[in-house]
Image (tube, rainbow, N blue to C red):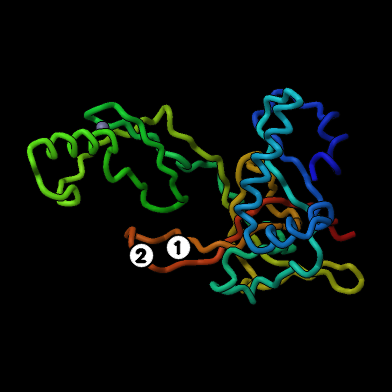
Amino acid sequence: MFERDYAQDLSRLGLEDEALFGFEVQYAHLAENDVLKNEFHTRPSEVLRIGNQVLREQFVKHNYSTRPIIRVVGFPDSYRRRVNELRMRDRGSLISVDVKVTSVSPPHGWLKYAHYVCDFCGETTRVEQRRARERKSPSFCKPCWEIEERELKKEGFPAPHLLRLPGSFQIDVSESHYKDIQSIHMREIAFDTQRHLVESRSQFEIEGVVSDDLVGDIKNHSLLRVNGILVVEPVPTRTFAKDTRRMLSIEVFSIEPLPDEE
Ligand SMILES: [Zn+2]
């Protein structure tokens, strides 16, 4: 798709020294390919992850040092959803909502990959993390485990699964990878037949998170069409890690400005 529909864009990009670049892709282009269309509908996060990899290869081909991030826009009406109708069972699905932004948090970050170093052998392990969850660390060090297993076998010890798994790690902050994010609070809006803005009530409010190049782009009180994936988040006010309460939020992957009321 990039080579067919975006070859000109790719060869003409005048990128400055930006580290990240939001690359807009029209849903209609993506939907021309049935496989891509179906996969994007059923596994949007995975398709975006692979798509970003493919686009990055295209950027490398053109000698762009910037990291591109796909921003799919122009969703058909079938993805338009009402906030008060969203349920937990809809998590993971693609949605498009027209909103007024009611608050924007300061930019902050989260640890996407933590880099751990084994205290005994120096082996490094990268552990993928999830936002707003307890940090995960490696359960054991494989090289140390192999040494211990070999040594104990020599001494005629029994089955390896009875052994203690070795592991003691330090996190290496400088090698760990962080992601920039910003939380937004929004309220669904609608337009009446005369294209006048109809502001909705508080039951139509929802949280969202934007990341990377979109951080800093969203103005409070702006009218936007927000496209993203519906996700389940822990409630922000939880006081203990195993709190089971969850709320719905939108992992925003693109925004489109809506016309202000005349
Ligand atoms: Zn080790």
Q: In the picture, which quadrant includes the N terminus?
A: top right
Left or right, residue 162 beside residue 167:
left
User: Picture quarter containing residue 195?
Assistant: bottom right
Q: Is mark 2 within 8 Å of ligand 1?
A: no
In space, the residues marked 1 and 2 are separated at their CA atoms by 8 Å
Q: Where does ligand 1 appear, by image quarter?
A: top left
Q: Tag 1: residue type?
A: Val
Q: Tag 2: residue type?
A: Asp
Q: Residue furthest bottom?
A: 85
Residues 164 and 25: in front is 164
Residue 51, above or below 224: above
Left or right, residue 70 beside residue 46:
right
Q: In the picture, which quadrant includes the C terminus?
A: bottom right
Residues 125 and 184: in front is 125
Mark 2 lies on a secondary structure that is loop
Which residue is labeled 2 in the image?
A: 243
Tell me the residue at 64%/46% (across/down). Answer: 50
Q: Which mark is residue 79?
A: none
Q: Is mark 1 within 8 Å of ligand 1?
A: no
Tell me the residue at 81%/51% (across/down). Answer: 26
| Position in image of residue 69 (x %, y %) | 68, 41
Cβ atoms at labels 1 and 2 below 8 Å apart: yes
Which residue is labeled 1 in the image?
A: 235
Left or right, residue 93 beside residue 199:
left
| Position in image of residue 116 (x %, y %) | 34, 34
Tell me the residue at 60%/52% (across/down). Answer: 46
Residues 223 and 69: in front is 69
Mark 1 lies on a secondary structure that is loop
User: Picture quarter containing residue 11?
Assistant: top right
